[in-house]
Image (cartoon, rainbow, N blue to C red):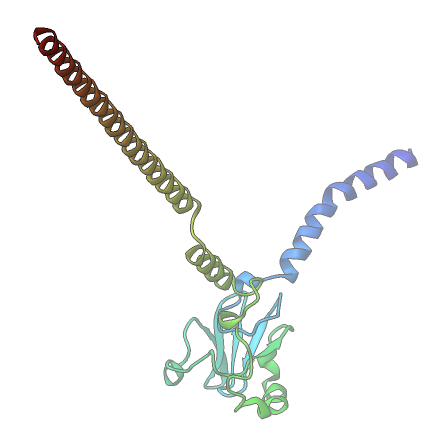
Amino acid sequence: MKKLKIAFILSALFLISPLLINAQISVNINIGSQPTWGPEEYDYVDYYYMPEIGIYYNVPRGQYIYQSGNRWVYAYNLPVQFRRYNLYNTYKVVINEPRPYLRHNYYSNHYKKYKNYHSRQINRRDSHNPRYNKSYNTRRQSHREVSRPSKNHHESYQSSHGNNNNRNSRVETNRRSNVNQGSQGNERKQVNQKSERSQKSQKSQGKQDRNDKRK
């Protein structure tokens, strides 16, 4: 009976373990949820804290968190006074703990030196690592395709080059044929001229013989 229980437990663990592994991976990686203005080299992020404006950003929910009066509110847009704020330029602190805004005094004092750290982080939009910036890999591939002649272009060039060679070969063959025909025509003309001169010479000799006999 104990062996059956052990076998049952092992079977259950064998079936459940892949689900646990996948869940752990999904929890530890959320690159696709991070905004393009977020800093690179982070596979998982819960919150960004922006010391310059004192606002948090919840990555899994895609919402900003800021104070409105005496309470913290979640919103999909920045407050009106920061609507034109350049998020790519400001410094972001990565925080992986639940509800960090409840310890706002600590984070505000601890990271106040980063308020003027403009453009000192590489954001995901400007990253050269395709893991964090898929569009960079796409741009490189597009550049390679533009810079390198396509296979079809190469084949069409070879085809046109081959056609030109064939045309040149036919022209050369026709030229040689015409030369041969002209040469043969000249030879026939020279033979006919020799034959005519020979006939004339024979006639002249025969006439001379007849005159000699009469004398």
Number of numbered discs visible in the structure rendering: 0
Q: Is residue 27 left or right of residue 166?
A: right
Give the image location of residue 12, x and y in percent.
77, 41
Front in this rendered view, residue 76 or 151: 151
The C terminus, quarter of image: top left
Q: In the image, what residue occupies the spot 62% across and 76% down?
A: 95
Front in this rendered view, residue 149 or 57: 149
Give the image location of residue 174, x and y in percent.
28, 31
Q: In the image, what residue occupies the spot 42% across and 78% down?
A: 78
Q: In the image, what residue occupies the spot 63% across and 72% down?
A: 98
Q: Is residue 215 left or right of residue 64?
A: left
Front in this rendered view, residue 141 or 39: 141
Q: Is residue 185 left or right of residue 63?
A: left
In the rendered view, would you say 132 is above or below 103?
above
| Residue at the far right in the pictured view | 2
In the rendered view, would you say 211 is above or below 191?
above
The N terminus, quarter of image: top right
Q: In the image, what residue occupies the spot 74% across and 47% down?
A: 17
- Tell me where residue 26 sits by quadrant: bottom right
| Residue at the far front in the pictured view | 215
Give the image location of residue 87, x and y in percent.
46, 79
Give the image location of residue 79, x and y in percent.
40, 81
In the rendered view, would you say 180 is above or below 70?
above
- Tell me where residue 110 sits by quadrant: bottom right
